[in-house]
Image (tube, rainbow, N blue to C red):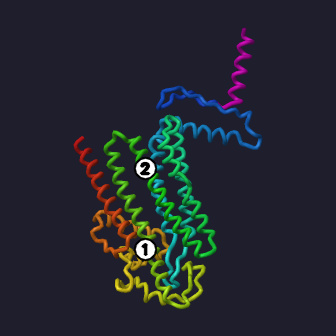
Amino acid sequence: MSRAMNLKDSTLKRRRRSSVSGESHRDAYSGATVNVSVSIEKLPGNIDGNILVKSFRYLYHILYSKGTFSNYILPIMCVIGISIDPFFLFIPFVDDTKKCVGLDKRLGFTAGILRSLFDLFYLLYIARRTRRRFLLHLFSIDLLAILPLPQVVISIVIQAKEGSELLYTIRLLKLCVIFQLVPRFIAIYELVADKFDRATWARATFNLFLFILAGHVFGSFWYFFAIEREIECWKEACLSQTGCGQGSFYCCDILGDYRFLNGFCPTKTRDTTIYDFGIFYDALQSGVVEATDFPQKFLHCFLWGLKTLSSFGRNLQLSGNGLESFFATLLILDALVLFFLFIGNIKVYLQS
């Protein structure tokens, strides 16, 4: 009898050594008991079993535990991740001396790495939410939000050799950021509504965050549109000048002397009779579009966005351009919606 017991104990010990068994955990959402094991004997010889086991245990802990990281830090990282996309719009800058557009490749590389890093957190959140329930419409939105479109476009921009190809790619980058902002906003709103449905203070804080994020988004687009507007002015001026050619205005392609554009596109002294830059003139006059110091131009544009949103766009001087008017309309409507949402949540919180 004792020999049989010893044989049974030794067999159990060998099984425990040959496999890593996740302890039985009760699912936080469904209440079911879950047990997961990974056999080390089946691992290829060139894979370190300890590293894989530790990675598996960590992933298992994220997907099934009710800890602080899974319930709070992971959603917060997903919310912060949406603020990375507007950084891509700061990559181009203007060389006012040569009258051309350059690229901050270091910023492009950094923004791509940060976006990919925060996408990993978002993938973990998608896996955790899909484990307890699968909703097709939410999964479709998550899929659109997680696509690495800006990273792909940035890699094309950095490797572009011809200026004409570069300018088209930069415009494609703008469209990618716009295209992904909508599903990412929806996904983040669903995330916050799911995690903090009954916490009024959390909703008020989130609305304040949305207001700050809107200032960041509109400020970055203001910067990007200002550069596009100056390029349009250069192209119009070149149509009536001999020797200007069909240049792309990419700094690597500039060979001639384009200083004559100062008379056709005045950016330091406002003259609407020559060319009206509208609401983008301040970005050109201040020289923020010429800055290669990222913190400097980020803070300047962020301050413009917050100031314009808080004043509901009262100080905007429009030029009559259609896209410019559409941009200003979106800004004012967004400011009104976010303001009333924030005030409404504060009122509910104080009443409760």
Residue 126: x %, y % from top left? 52, 43
Residues drawn in magenta: 1-20
- Residue with the most extreme left position: 351
* 195 to the left or right of 64: left
Give the camera-side residue of 249 and 339. 249
Task: Indicate the position of residue 342 as horizontal and vertical percent values.
Answer: 29, 52
Residue 17 in the magenta stretch? The answer is yes
Displayed quadrant of residue 336: bottom left
Q: CA distance from mark 2 to mark 1?
A: 28 Å
Q: Verify whether residue 64 appears in magenta.
A: no
For the residue pair 128 and 161, the one nearer the viewer reads as: 161
| Above or below 201: residue 332 | below
What's under tag 1, amino acid-wise?
Answer: Ala
Going 36% across and 76% down the picture, which residue do you hit? 278
For marks 2 and 1 on the same chain, the one whose residue lies earlier in the sequence: 2
Pinpoint residue 88: horizontal percent, then vertical percent: 51, 64
Q: Which corner quadrant holds the C terminus?
A: top left
Seen in the image, is 70 located left or right of residue 158? left
Dot 1: element: helix
Report which residue position mark 2 lands on: 186
Asked whether the residues under the numbered discs 2 and 1 touch, taking CB atoms below 8 Å apart as contact, a structural biologist would say no
**Secondary structure, magenta segment, majority class:** helix
Q: Quadrant of the N terminus?
A: top right
